[in-house]
Amino acid sequence: MSKKYIRLLAGVMTITMIWLMIIQIEWIKNAKIVQEQQFTQNVNKSLYKIVNNIEVV
């Protein structure tokens, strides 16, 4: 294997690893957003149930 081929392969592998890290970071950001939305939705549901129970009493 020539040095040129090894350098090209190393460059492609580096670009691929950077691309995979970017995808993982975006995935983690999206997961955090979804988790926050679910938490907010659960809090709102709980508050709605509490208000309804108070109104019934």
Image (cartoon, rainbow, N blue to C red):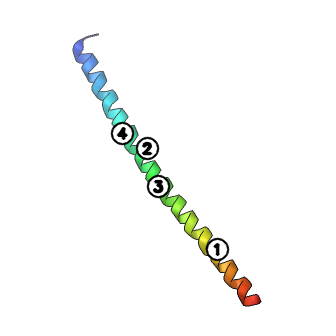
Say if mark 2 contacts mark 1, CB within 8 Å. no
Tag on residue 22? Answer: none
- Counting residues from the start of the chain, the first of labels 4 and 2 encountered is 4
**Residue at 26% over, 17% down:** 5
Q: Considering only order in the chain, which callout, 1 or 2, is on the residue closer to the N terminus? A: 2
| Rendering coords of residue 8 (x, y %) | 26, 23
Dot 4: within a 10 Å radius of its alpha carbon, few (fewer than 14), some, or many (20 or more) residues?
Answer: few
For the residue labelled by badge 2, is the local secondary structure a helix, a strand or a loop?
Answer: helix
Q: Position of residue 48 (x, y in %)?
A: 65, 79
Local packing at callout 3 (Cα closer than 10 Å; few below 14, some 14-19, many 20+) is few
Image depth: mark 3 or mark 1 in front? 1
According to the image, label 4 marks what residue? 19
Q: Name the residue tied to disc 2.
A: 24
Of residue 55 and residue 18, the one placed in the foreground of this image is: 55
Dot 3 falls on a residue whose secondary structure is helix
- Amino acid type at mark 4: Trp
Point out the residue furthest to the left here: 4
How far apart are the two marked residues, 2 and 1, measured between alpha carbons? 31 Å
Marks 3 and 4, how far apart at CA: 17 Å
Q: Is residue 49 above or below residue 40?
A: below
Question: Label 4 to label 1, Cα distance in Å?
Answer: 39 Å
Q: Which mark is residue 45?
A: 1
